[in-house]
Amino acid sequence: MTGIRLDSVSKVYAGGHLAVDELSLEVADGEFMVLLGPSGCGKTTVLRMIAGLEEVTDGQVWFGRTEATPMTPKDRGVAMVFQNGALYPNRTARENIIFPLRMAGEDPVEASAKAAGLAQILGIDGALDRLPWTLSGGQRQRVAIGRAIIRQPQVFLMDEPLSNLDATMRTELRQEIGSMTRDMKVTTVYVTHDQVEALTLADRIAIMRDGKIEDVGTPAQVYDDPATAFTAGFLGTPRINLIGATVQVTARHRVTLAFGTQSIALPPTDRRSMILSHHDGEQVVVGARSDAFALTTDTDATNQLTGTLRALEFHGHQWIAFVDSGVELLSPDLIGLSKRKRSRANSEGRPTSHSAGSRAHRTAGRVSAFGAKTRSLIRKATPAPPELITSPTHRRSDLVLEIDNTGGLSAGDRIRLALDVSRIHIFDPHGHRVDRVKR
Ligand code: ATP
């Protein structure tokens, strides 16, 4: 077994497309690392560079203390499972699983015993003598995993192995992959765009965007303490509310975050208060998950937002409320994008702001509080085209919050929301946290 280190690895495909951009990552010996990110962010390319199936344009791949960059895939001791683990159609499940051992000249009796042990772990012991076409998709994928892992690889790579399975099968096999890789203590890199798979399987998750890593940490770290607005937006259902705000500092160094006509105050003891007290008038992005809000009737309490309840959705164990509060909601996909990529995203019709028709209140080209000269994130909002309105009950201008019971509320009611400021994250205009994130 071995750890993996990617040292400033880049991949430029023919035609000049930069798919992976100076990416560095360490995976410890025996660790289960998940690469998570939207389609096209470079996850599969990273996996294929680790396997040696894709040449590295720049940088190095290390397996332990050995540089693997010049090694052939065969010499790397890597096993890989894809979305559709292709099997030999005229061989039984058992013969498929032991095939790599037969090729390596291993004793057939021992190979068969190993296959039987693995089949039990993978829950296919009753199907070992069947041909692939008689197996379900989940069973076939289990056979493919068994065949990959039976050689006891140094490194186990999986590229969306569950994406072609139905929901029940996905959950079952996900749990089996988790317990099998932990039992075998094999270093694993697993690619997915499914946050549930990432959060449930990973020792650590690397969140990727545009060929780079945005954040790396344990599932709890990246969910509860995200380093960037993109990470905060990628993890969590419903999606986090990312609200454009202006820092306002009073004469007594009290820090208020103004959302247009509404505002919240940070306690003076909050370390973000100290950081922001030097940045009066600057823009920030406030991230508040749907459960950071609570309905209140207390008119005197601090840190409240008011709004109109636009819709309620019943989700079984809770209700999701959509509230029109007039604040400016931002798309995590656009925060921190370069000017070029942002204008490309805009021309592709992605919204710059969730808020339809709210007023612009920023100036472009000012020096940011956090060092670099940046354009304002929050620009004059244009109404979202109808196709971007995700459902009749979810307009992108709505704050989204969870409530346990509706207490007789209905659409059109004015409501008060208490916001727990200890649970908000504050990001600079580039999408980075203004306070330091420990990993
Ligand atoms: P998905 O989740 O959709 O599989 P991904 O995050 O795994 O996406 P990659 O498949 O690594 O992303 O692709 C990263 C980028 O590189 C994409 O823009 C893709 O179009 C491009 N790309 C991938 N393979 C090639 C190739 N062989 N030639 C040129 N461009 C490629």
Image (cartoon, rainbow, N blue to C red):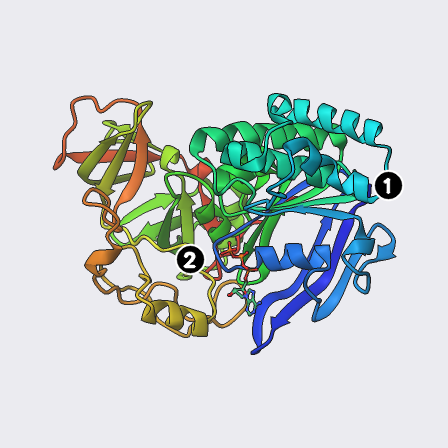
The label nearer to you, 1 versus 2, is 1
The image quadrant where one finds ligand 1 is bottom right
Look at the image and tell me in which quarter the N terminus lies: top right
> Is 109 on the left or on the right of 187, as rendered?
right
Circle 2 sits in a helix, a strand or a loop, which is it? loop
> Is 326 on the left or on the right of 289, as rendered?
left
Measuring from the top left, give residue 244's x and y in whole percent. Answer: 36, 55
Q: Residue at x 20, y 21 (%)?
A: 407
> Is 216 on the left or on the right of 31, as rendered?
left
Question: Alpha-carbon distance for marks 1 and 2?
Answer: 51 Å
Circle 1 sits in a helix, a strand or a loop, which is it? loop
Query: Which residue is disc 1 drawn over?
Result: 105
| In the image, residue 322 above or below residue 345 | above
Contact (Cβ within 8 Å) of mark 1 with mark 2: no
Residue nearer the viewer, 412 or 197: 197
Q: Which residue is drawn at 47% across and 67% down?
A: 368
- The mark nearer the N terminus, 1 or 2, is 1
Residue nearer the viewer, 313 or 200: 200
Determine the image quadrant of residue 423. top left
Query: Which residue is disc 2 drawn over?
Result: 333
Measuring from the top left, give residue 141's x and y in whole percent. Answer: 57, 37
Measuring from the top left, give residue 168's x and y in whole percent. Answer: 45, 28
Residue placed farthest to the left in the image? 412
Does residue 226 show up?
yes
